Image (spheres, rainbow, N blue to C red):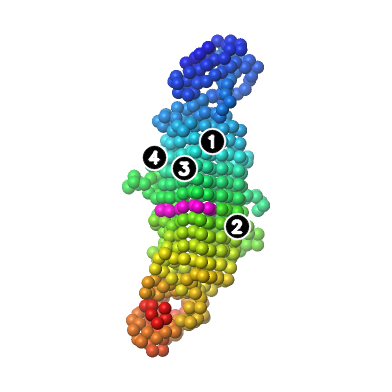
Amino acid sequence: MALALISELVTTPIVANEKIHVLGYNNIGDGGGGDFYWDAASSAQEDGGTIFKSQNSATGRWKRLYNSPLSAVWFGAKGDGTTDDSNSLLKAVKTAQGRILDGEGRTYLVSLSLLVQSNTTIRNFRFQHAGSGTDFSSVLTVDGLDSEKQNILFENIYINGNRDNHVNINAAAEDGGRHGIRCLGACKHLTFRNVEIEYCATDGIEFFSGQAIQSLDTYLFEYIKIEDSRFSWNRRHGISGDCMKAVELKNVELSFNGLDTALATGKPDNHGSKGDRVNGNLYGNGVDWEGYSNGTNIVDLLMDNVRAFKNAICGIQFWDYSKNTDNESTWRPWERIRIVNSYSDQGQFPTPSFGTGTLYNSAIRLLGSPLYGTFRDIAIENNFLEGNILLQSCDKVSISNNNADFIYPVGVDERPNQLLYCRDVFIRDLQYTCNVEPMLFYSSNSTGVVYENSKNNIEWAGKYLDVIPSFVQDLRVHRIGNTLKFYLKIGNAAIASGDTILKFKWWSKNNQPFKVINFYRIDSFAPAFNAVLKGSQNGDSLTALAAYNFTGNAVFCEFETAVLADIF
């Protein structure tokens, strides 16, 4: 017997041992039909795609005959990109637990979040979000808050989050929680293969612990793989995550995240077209690994052939300021992090530091609390970077065979938080494609910084520069073409008028221009005092013009001098 549509199964007479062939679900030939048989003994729950009740019998079920993966169109989804298929897909995804659900490459418009269960494969789908005024309306959700979810594969998935049609986004709740794929709580063995997610109203993929960590022996997200995938033009980050172990990103692109779209003009900050903001400033990254409390760290992370570029801020960010003196003794560090064979840049709107307009300009940054040991065992190897590497609170760092095309390659930005509270940082074979040679790194609270076969040469300092250690806390020197650029921080002492702060061991024959250098307070950026840079036959020097007591009120300055050919 043949029927036109699935709806006719409900009323068709039941004939024992007879197979029914249905020509379509909503329309003949739409792919949602198939072969069915009557199981008189079954009381299985109707699922809307493979099991149907009959009005002609209180017991028994019509069951679909199949030996292939489930198809979304079997559950009534049209996949035409204009019909809201949410209700049909909710049934399909629920039924798919322990099975494969295939979208057959069609485009599905959705307005509700689809909850994916354990032991499920979702493949060959193109999703278009309908837009929303409600938070936590991600396209796909893996919710492990109440019970652990595991063994889930997303393969050949495209998601367009339609962020321009999202409104009233609440910044206090996951910045809206309107992701492409939202993973919560305890989730293990999740694989994302050939996944492309763009234009979501929050992140492409979010891994969010969403709860206090019950034990420092526990990681909520374990064995996560993202490969051959792309995340672009999402309102906040391409990817974000915390409390993770054994994570791999291979062949992943993260681009143009955190930016305004073309429709942002005149829209409020909580509109989907506006890049996510903090205090009015864009802050989205390519990937944001961020800790919120002790135990939300990430360990055993590999990023291989990751391309992070043209995002609002930096390409690759690690951020955890939750370490403090109260939890220092039990702190669980971020460790065994590898970033290799990758490309990252400093983004289109690098974060202003210290309110002075000077920029972080970081391609990779690991920012921890102003204590030692937030991060440890870090390897950054064989990368090309258009931006610097910013390190704070990092132990045992290996930076090897990287090529940097930027003015401040390794934690040597113009502000004093670029390589602080670090121990045992080994920098080897650092190459530059720009006209920059960083000459010196000096910091009073970082130890074990070693340069090998790199442009930085600590011997340069002893040969050409006298540093007055009672004054100087932090000193950076770079060669930029024919100019030496200095950043200097001093503190914890008092200075008298006429005191020499720096003395240069070269004779400029009085050709060093007389230059007044302004010092500013670190805490408020208010003017502190002036010094004079001048040349003489006894050597150029930087000398205070006025007395100043900067104990507890560190000050900084920036200045440039000419490079002398007889020295360099």
Task: Identify the magenta region.
Answer: 303-311
How far apart are the alpha carbons under marks 1 and 4?
26 Å
Local secondary structure at mark 2: strand
Say if 99 sits above or below 317 in the image.
Answer: above
How far apart are the alpha carbons under marks 1 and 2?
31 Å
Q: Nearer the viewer, mark 1 or mark 4?
A: 1
Label 3 packing within 10 angstroms: few (<14), some (14-19), many (20+) = many
Q: What residue appears at the point 53 percent right and 63 percent down from the top-left corner? A: 400
Pinpoint residue 50: horizontal percent, then vertical percent: 56, 23
Mark with earlier residue (2, 4):
4
How far apart are the alpha carbons under marks 2 and 4?
40 Å
Furthest-bottom residue in this view? 537
Pinpoint residue 481: horizontal percent, then vertical percent: 37, 72
Contact flag, marks 3 and 4 (Cβ < 8 Å): no
Point out the image quarter for the C terminus: bottom left
| Horizontal relation, residue 249 to residue 276: left or right | right
Local secondary structure at mark 3: strand
Contact flag, marks 1 and 4 (Cβ < 8 Å): no
Q: What residue type is labelled 1?
A: Ile
Q: Mark 2 points at which residue?
A: 336
Q: Name the residue under label 3.
A: 196
Label 4 packing within 10 angstroms: few (<14), some (14-19), many (20+) = some
The prevailing secondary structure element of the residues shown in magenta is strand
